[in-house]
């Protein structure tokens, strides 16, 4: 019996190893890119949240100053009707309303910060595929 002819169309072990290495390298790059994009969104939301908290703190400080001046004008009542002290109180109320709005918006943005769950899940699935064992 004659030996079976060698089929040149089948890949060699070296070619298969090179392909697997290239695939794992591409997979790792894609997972890193996913992690970067998730972290970028979280950092952006955190930055906006901190900015709104900073504005809320500044506006609260301004309202404290104006509130103190308004209280002084209330103690020194200088006439009937809508006087200067009431004007200071109205401005203080507006500052407090703006501070409350900024604080609320800051809370909403900070609440959006989350861990990169998709990247962690992908890494666990990749580990399971590579090792053939259960994921973390």
Image (spheres, rainbow, N blue to C red):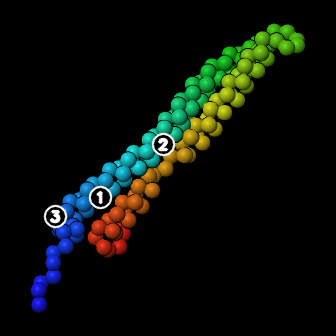
Name the residue tied to disc 2.
41
Q: From the viewer's side, name the closer residue of 2 and 26.
A: 2
29 vs 82: above or below = below
Instruction: Work out how far the residue at label 3 is from the one at label 1, CA to CA, in angstroms.
Output: 14 Å
Residue beneath the point at 49% across and 35% down? 47
82 vs 113: above or below = above
Residue 6 image point, x, y percent? 15, 75
Name the residue tied to disc 1.
23
Residue 27 image point, x, y percent? 33, 56
In the drawing, what numbered circle is on residue 31?
none
Q: Nearer the viewer, mark 1 or mark 2?
A: 1
Name the residue tied to disc 3.
14
Where on the picture, by quarter, is residue 63? top right
Instruction: Work out how far the residue at label 1 is from the one at label 2, CA to CA, in angstroms.
Output: 27 Å
Residue 23 image point, x, y percent? 29, 58
Q: From the viewer's side, name the closer residue of 55 and 85.
A: 55
Q: Nearer the viewer, mark 3 or mark 2?
A: 3
Residue beneath the point at 85% across and 14% down? 82
């Amino acid at each position: 019996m004659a030996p079976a002819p060698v089929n040149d169309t089948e890949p060699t072990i070296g070619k298969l190893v090179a392909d697997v290495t290239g695939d794992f390298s591409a997979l790792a790059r894609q997972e890193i890119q996913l992690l970067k994009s998730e972290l970028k969104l979280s950092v952006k939301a955190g930055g906006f949240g901190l900015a709104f908290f900073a504005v809320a703190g500044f506006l609260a400080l301004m309202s404290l100053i104006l509130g103190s001046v308004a209280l002084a004008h209330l103690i020194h009542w200088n006439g009937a009707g809508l006087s200067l002290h009431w004007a200071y109180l109205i401005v203080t109320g507006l500052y407090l309303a703006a501070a409350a709005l900024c604080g609320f918006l800051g809370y909403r943005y900070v609440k959006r910060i989350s861990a990169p769950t998709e990247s962690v899940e992908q890494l666990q699935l990749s580990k399971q595929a590579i090792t053939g064992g259960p994921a973390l």
